[in-house]
Image (tube, rainbow, N blue to C red):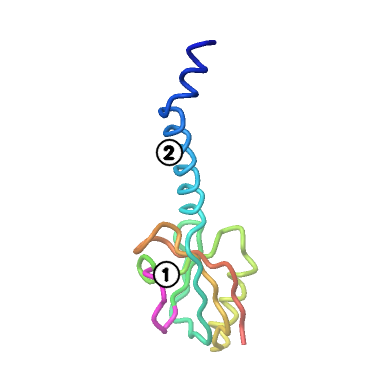
Amino acid sequence: MFQFSNFVKSSNFYKSMALLSLSLMSASSHAQGVSFDVAGVTITTVGVHGATPYFRIQEPLAAQCAYLLIYIPSDKKSMYAQVLAAKLAGRKLSRVNYTLTNGPNSECHAVVVEME
């Protein structure tokens, strides 16, 4: 018991706790990704890779998405239906919000899709 209290009093304990806290904060902020919004965009390509649908837009993306694709989570079938409807009708998407998941040149995932 005496050794543990000496360890807590030493600076090594506080350094370890600070490092652990910073690691946890870094991991949580890294996992969330960075969010981007674009408006009035034209869909050029629609496809599916494995079980995950994706689309491309004509206008330049604000983020460096891998292969210039915006993936739609496979559990968001209604979002994919809306993208398909816009593409087939020749309509623009009035708003797309997407996240860059893991830094430049990583996957982008759609969060919000609105059709004109």
Q: Measure the alpha-carbon separation of dots 2 and 1.
A: 36 Å
| Of the pair 17 and 92, the residue shown nearer to us | 17
> Which residue is rendered at x = 49% and y = 72% of the image?
36
Q: Are marks 2 and 1 in contact (CB under 8 Å)?
A: no
Provide residue 85's location: percent of width, then percent of height: 60, 80
Instruction: Answer left or right for 105 relative to 72.
Output: left
Camera-side mark, 2 or 1: 2
Task: Please check the rendered image and state whether residue 44 is part of the magenta-colored stretch, yes or no.
Answer: no
Residue 63 image-quadrant placement:
bottom left
What residue is disc 1 on?
A: 69
Counting the numbered discs, the total is: 2
Residue 19: which disc?
2
Q: Secondary structure at mark 1?
A: strand
Residue plotted at (58% across, 85% down): 94
Q: Which residues are magenta?
A: 57-64
Q: Position of residue 102 (x, y in %)?
A: 41, 57
Magenta run includes residue 60: yes
Residue type indicated by callout 1:
Leu
- Dividing the picture into quadrants, the one containing residue 64 is bottom left
Q: Nearer the viewer, residue 48 or 76?
A: 76
* In-front residue for pair 10/104: 10
Residue that appears at 46% across and 56% down: 50
Image quadrant in which the C terminus is located: bottom right
Q: Residues within 10 Å of mark 1 (few under 14, many from 20)?
A: many
Tell me where residue 69 appears, x and y as whole percent: 42, 69
Element on which disc 2 rests: helix
- In x, y percent, where is residue 112? 60, 71
